[in-house]
Image (tube, helix red, strand yellow):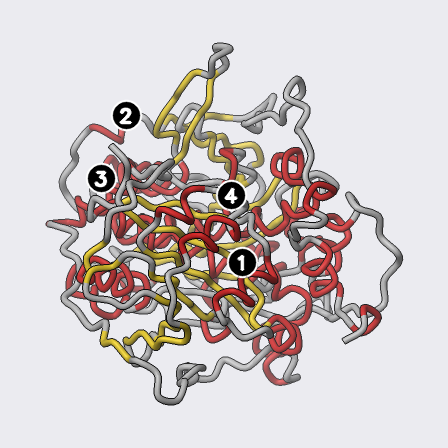
Amino acid sequence: MSDLQLSIAQHYHERTKYDPKTIANKTHEPDWNHPPAPFKEYKLGTAFDLKPYLTSKFEGKDDTNLDWQRLSRLLFCSYGLTVRMLTQNGDPIYLRASPSAGGLYPAEVYLISRGTPLLPAGLYHYQPQAHALLRFWDDEVWSALQSACFWHPSLDHTQLAIATTAIFFRSAWRYQDRAYRRIFLDTGHLLGNIELACAISDYRPHLIGGFVDTALNKLLYLDSTQEGSIAVVALADLLDIQQNLPLAPTALPSSTRTSYPSLADGELLAYLHASTHIEVVNESASIQDLLKQEIVASTAQPLEDKYNFPFCLKVSMATAEINWGENLIGLENTILKRRSTRAYSGANLALDELKALLDFTYQPQHYIDQGLDPTPDYFDLNLIETFIAVSGVDGLEEGCYYYAPRAQELRQIRFKNFRRELHRLCLGQNLGRDAGAVLFHTADLQQAVMQYGDRVYRYLHMDAGHLGQRLNLAAIHLGLGVSGIAGFYDDEVNEVLGIPTDEAVLYITTLGRPRK
């Protein structure tokens, strides 16, 4: 396919690929004297301190303190500061409950209230540095939110919603144009945390990815040249049965742009983001209207597993579920202690450990008895495929496998130990070489664009990050090491591992035994 036929999302993906011959031109040394500000601050507003509700225990369904505790736990487990460290120069580094490439944390979290006994109607910004909510606007804003989200039914009876945004420079400062990938992987991690933190605190999150970008940016008072709206999550209160709403479409398509100007390096990120906006259809357009007009993409039942290679080795991955403990206390503790592993020992994983990791990540229906959502919202998991390079798993032959989630089995596609190649593919990082297993999330980008337009590039990376976060938490809970990698030689991954060439590699997650 010639470059002129590529959509802007495909063009961006091709332009930001890492290749051994050109990677020196696509990476740079950040200006360490002028790093991006790690926190967003407001000069005016009313603060609601959430810290007292993290340690205190409250009982009673109607106790206002209990409601504060639930909200405090939700936000802290989603994006709270969990560690403060100092660099060699004495500068502070803050780590959060959700992982981020390079520790740059481009995401911002806002809470929108329709008006509750807890929170008056208005806009709130979550300030992780103080674990507080800052009410910076007190107008009635819910109807404007509904309009921006095409009157999504999840907003009909809910009273609270989270909006996540991204401050682009925080990641672009280090990763330049390729930062767009990392921003949405980071947001996927955050959405994974929000999903699980909601279960811990008795909310049900309803994900909304289709909204009018300019309207939502305006609603949140964003400088759209610096910060953009990424996702909306309606929060249904599970203690109020009237708010337990049916599922509704999470993803809407944007246009597909195949004609665009010649863009210099450094201009791709902003142009792509603007190109993935959804424009206003009309002032009162609703999801129902879009469905009638067949503008919205298909919401059919999941497809069959995509690859079923003839005569390949097939290994069942069915297993018992991970036990997260009473009231999901094990899950909460895992979220708060999660860290990316810096080095692996090279020792093998057990097959049962790999089975448990995949079970928690891809079989959420197994965890309904523990209080977790059996059908968590994604944008479209039908578009995401998973391949696993096995270098050291007891009881499993070395090689590359396709994971078939519906059949719950691994299907071998290549027979080889890939440790040396994985070291190279992951840009010389020892994590790839020393891991027991390396997971690759991929997608057929051309087919995905045909279904959702250029906006699908957001959806794909957020879904890959969401899956990656579940892998992170399951690995940490089992005492394993885990680390995500977003920098790799794109085309060589497909060539070396035998992954079909039409599968664009989105994300890599390494799994192994941490070095002590």
Question: Of marks 2 and 1, which one's residue comes earlier in the chain?
Answer: 2
Q: Is residue 166 left or right of residue 125?
A: right
Categorize mark 1 by other alpha carbons within 10 Å: few (<14), some (14-19), many (20+).
many
* Inter-mark Cα distance, 2 to 4: 45 Å
User: Badge 4, how many Cα within 10 Å: few under 14, some, many 20+?
Assistant: some
Q: What is the crowding at mark 2: few (fewer than 14 residues within 10 Å), some, or many (at least 20)? A: few
Residue located 52% across and 54% down the image: 232
Q: Percent position (x, y) of residue 325?
A: 12, 50
- Give the image location of residue 243, x and y in percent: 34, 62
* Residue for badge 1: 461
Badge 1 amino acid: His
Closer to us: mark 2 or mark 4?
A: 4
Quarter occupied by residue 55? top left
Give the labeled residue for mark 2. 52
Residue at 40 percent across and 19 percent down: it is 85
Residue to which mark 4 is pinned: 428
In the drawing, what numbered circle is on residue 219?
none
Q: Residue 481, can we see it?
A: yes
Instruction: Report if the CB atoms under discs 3 and 1 are less than 8 Å apart.
Output: no
Q: Secondary structure at mark 2?
A: helix
Sequence-first disc among 3 and 1: 3
Mark 1 / mark 4, whichever is N-terminal: 4
* Image side of residue 229 versus residue 130, left or right: right
Front-most of residues 185 and 59: 185
How far apart in space, not on screen, are marks 3 and 1 (Cα)?
Answer: 26 Å
What residue would you read off at disc 3?
Answer: 333
Image marks 2 and 1: residues in contact by CB distance under 8 Å: no
Per the model, the C-alpha gap separating discs 2 and 1 is 35 Å
Q: Of label 4 and label 3, which has the lower sequence position? A: 3
Q: What amino acid is found at the position of numbered circle 3 in the picture?
A: Asn
Q: CA distance from mark 1 to mark 4?
A: 23 Å
